[in-house]
Amino acid sequence: MVYFQNSGQDSGAVSTASFTPVFKIDDFLSIIITAEDPEAAKVYNLPQPATSSNQGYIVGNPAPFGYLVNANGEICLPVLGNITVAGKTRMELEEEIKLKLHDQLKSPTVQIQILNFKITVLGDVKAPGTFKIPNERITILEGIGLAGDLRMSGVRKNVLVIRDSVGVKKEYRIDLTSKDVFSSPAYYLQQNDVVYVQPNASARAEGTLWKTTGTIFISLTSLVVSTIILITR
């Protein structure tokens, strides 16, 4: 199967929109604040998870410490209190926190990461599942690649992306056979996006036929077995 079939028809470069994750409700964020004086910055960070050891080996994996964005789109930082984060980009939130720390720390820096950035790929792909994305940046092509690519029966011209945007479900349709995929708003996947690949008509018909014939076969088998039992009694 051929992807991007109309690529190369013009000499213009395909424009790919830049992507910066926007924080959402239920995101789990790691926020680390540092400054020239590390001791002064400690009070603005969560305590480090404790680990126990046994004869030099660490016992168990410590749970990650972070901030869960609540239903109001807020997190609660030590000392600074509640801050609204939903709808903001990483750069916007970092600048806001640094501004709050300006009079309290010298040369503060803020590092933010989404700890639960994941996508789900379902439908007619070779290995459907949910995949954690550590670098928070993935395209729909890379997501499909994680799922082992589409099967031959997968519909490439109508791939569905379902996205939760501020509590509202949005749907995007993508044609993988066209280079227009690069300019789609769903080319870069966001956290918790769901990609669904539907099977073509032949695959759906085959599945329905197998289900029907399978049911008939089981019924006939049961009838034959019952008849044999009655005859041999």
Image (cartoon, rainbow, N blue to C red):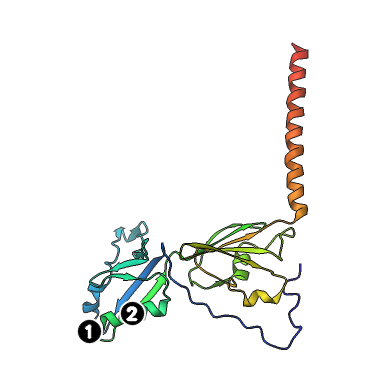
Distance of mark 1 from mark 2, alpha carbons?
13 Å
Question: Where is mark 2, residue-wise?
Answer: 96
Q: Is residue 216 above or below residue 5?
A: above
Q: Is residue 148 left or right of residue 79?
A: right
Badge number at residue 215: none
Specify the quadrant that holds the N terminus: bottom right
Residue found at x 37% / y 59% = 61
Q: Earlier in the sequence, mark 1 or mark 2?
A: 2
Residue 153 higher or lower than 97, as above or below: above
Provide residue 10's location: percent of width, then percent of height: 74, 86
Q: Tell me which amino acid carries mark 2.
A: Glu
Q: Amino acid at mark 1?
A: Asp
SS class, disc 2: helix
| Residue 103 percent location from the top left of the image | 22, 84
Q: Nearer the viewer, residue 19 or 233?
A: 19
* Number of numbered discs overlaid on the protein picture: 2
Q: Which residue is mark 1?
A: 103
Q: Secondary structure at mark 1?
A: loop
Tell me whether circle 1 and circle 2 mark residues in contact (CB < 8 Å).
no
What is the residue that sits farthest to the bottom in this orientation?
11
List x then y, in percent, for residue 228. Answer: 77, 18
Is residue 80 depicted above or below 123 in this figure?
below
Quarter where residue 211 is shown: top right
Which residue occupies 73% across, 88% down? 11
Counting other residues with Cα less than 10 Å from the Cα at mark 2, is it few (<14), some (14-19), or many (20 or more)?
some
Q: Position of residue 15 (x, y in %)?
A: 62, 83
In screen coordinates, is 133 left or right of 25? right
Using residue 28 as the reference point, say whether residue 203 is left or right of it: right
